[in-house]
Image (tube, grey):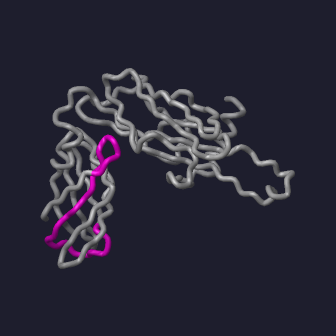
């Protein structure tokens, strides 16, 4: 393993709990999710350095465990180059290829996570202004969906096919979602209005041919009401939907 890669892995270990937002990180990923169609040889992701300094950047793909060390992950994808230096106001294209090392389901999507760790250049601590400088490594993580060829329906319509139900679980009201489609459905947010009050719903994602339960924050007992939600399409756009429960 190169000294450079060792350095970035060390930085990752020290900052594993640091997840950046676009306003914090200097490295910007082109898009909020990656769709890998099975009929493609590879997909490209563009990274842009919006900061004032060059940055060392490492990228990898994980299976869902955000604490796993990159070297221990056995995802069936290769991202090249895995490590790069991106100058200020410049960019770098990352090519992602499905290796076939693991056979993925052909009747539904599979989800992985694309990670980008940016490490600023080491400051000159001999300078007075840098003696107490704290440097942080930022990590950004977005979803990567592997989409088999020939799936019925469309991802754009999947959220409209969800079946909803309000129920009580362990002293809290929950919204249950059933996904009869082969596509993942991700949410940007959701609210539930009942008894004249609006409650936030902790809606995240529903897997293909699966069910999920989302907590209605502040509501203890299930009662009839209206659910309003915002799902996210392939391009990061918002699709509004609602259901009476």
Residue 188 in view, yes or no = yes
Residue at image x 77%, y 48%?
123
Q: In this view, does 216 lie to the left or right of 119?
A: left
* Residue 220 on the magenta span: yes
Point out residue 85 in the picture as x, y percentages from the top left corner.
Answer: 64, 34
User: In front here: 53 or 234?
Assistant: 53
Asked if 197 appears above or below 23 in the picture, the reply is below
Q: In this view, does 98 lie to the left or right of 228?
A: right
Point out residue 76 in the picture as x, y percentages from the top left corner.
Answer: 43, 29
Q: Which of the 4 image quadrants contains residue 103?
A: top left
Asked if 219 appears above or below 190 in the picture, the reply is below
Q: Which of the 4 image quadrants contains residue 233?
A: top left
Asked if 8 appears above or below 164 in the picture, the reply is above
Q: In this view, does 113 lie to the left or right of 157?
A: right
Residue 101 in view, yes or no = no
User: In front here: 8 or 232?
Assistant: 232
User: In front here: 157 or 68?
Assistant: 157
Which quadrant of the figure contains the N terminus?
top right
Residue at image x 16%, y 61%?
165
Which residue occupies the extreme bottom position in the image?
196
Tell me how many marks there are. Answer: 0
* Residue 228 on the magenta span: yes
Residue at image x 32%, y 29%?
37
Q: In the image, which residues are magenta?
A: 216-238
Which quadrant of the figure contains the C terminus?
bottom left
Point out residue 166 in the picture as x, y percentages from the top left corner.
Answer: 18, 65
Point out residue 150 in the picture as x, y percentages from the top left corner.
Answer: 21, 27
Q: Which of the 4 image quadrants contains residue 106?
A: top left
Residue at image x 25%, y 51%?
239
Main structural element of the magenta stretch: helix, strand or loop?
loop
């Amino acid at each position: 393993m190169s000294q450079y890669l060792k350095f970035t892995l060390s930085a990752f270990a020290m900052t594993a709990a640091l997840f950046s937002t676009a306003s914090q990180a200097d490295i910007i990923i082109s898009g909020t999710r990656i769709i890998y169609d099975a009929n493609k040889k590879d997909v490209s992701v563009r990274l842009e350095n919006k900061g004032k300094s060059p940055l060392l950047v490492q990228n990898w793909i994980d299976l869902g465990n955000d604490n796993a060390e990159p070297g221990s992950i056995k995802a069936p994808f290769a991202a090249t180059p895995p490590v790069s230096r991106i100058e200020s106001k410049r960019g770098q294209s990352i090519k992602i290829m499905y290796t076939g090392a693991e056979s993925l389901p052909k009747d539904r999507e599979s989800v992985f996570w694309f990670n980008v760790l940016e490490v600023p250049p080491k400051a000159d601590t001999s300078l007075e202004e840098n003696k107490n400088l704290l440097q942080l490594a930022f990590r950004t993580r977005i979803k990567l969906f592997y989409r088999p060829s020939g799936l019925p329906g469309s991802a754009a319509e999947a959220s409209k096919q969800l079946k909803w139900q309000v129920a009580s679980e362990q002293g809290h009201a929950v919204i249950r979602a059933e996904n009869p489609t082969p596509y993942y459905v991700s949410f940007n947010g959701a609210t539930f209005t009942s008894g004249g009050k609006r409650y936030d719903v902790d809606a995240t994602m529903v897997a293909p041919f699966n069910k999920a339960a989302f907590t209605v924050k502040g509501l203890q007992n299930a009662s009839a009401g209206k659910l309003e939600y915002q799902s996210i399409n392939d391009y990061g756009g918002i699709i509004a939907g609602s259901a009476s429960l």
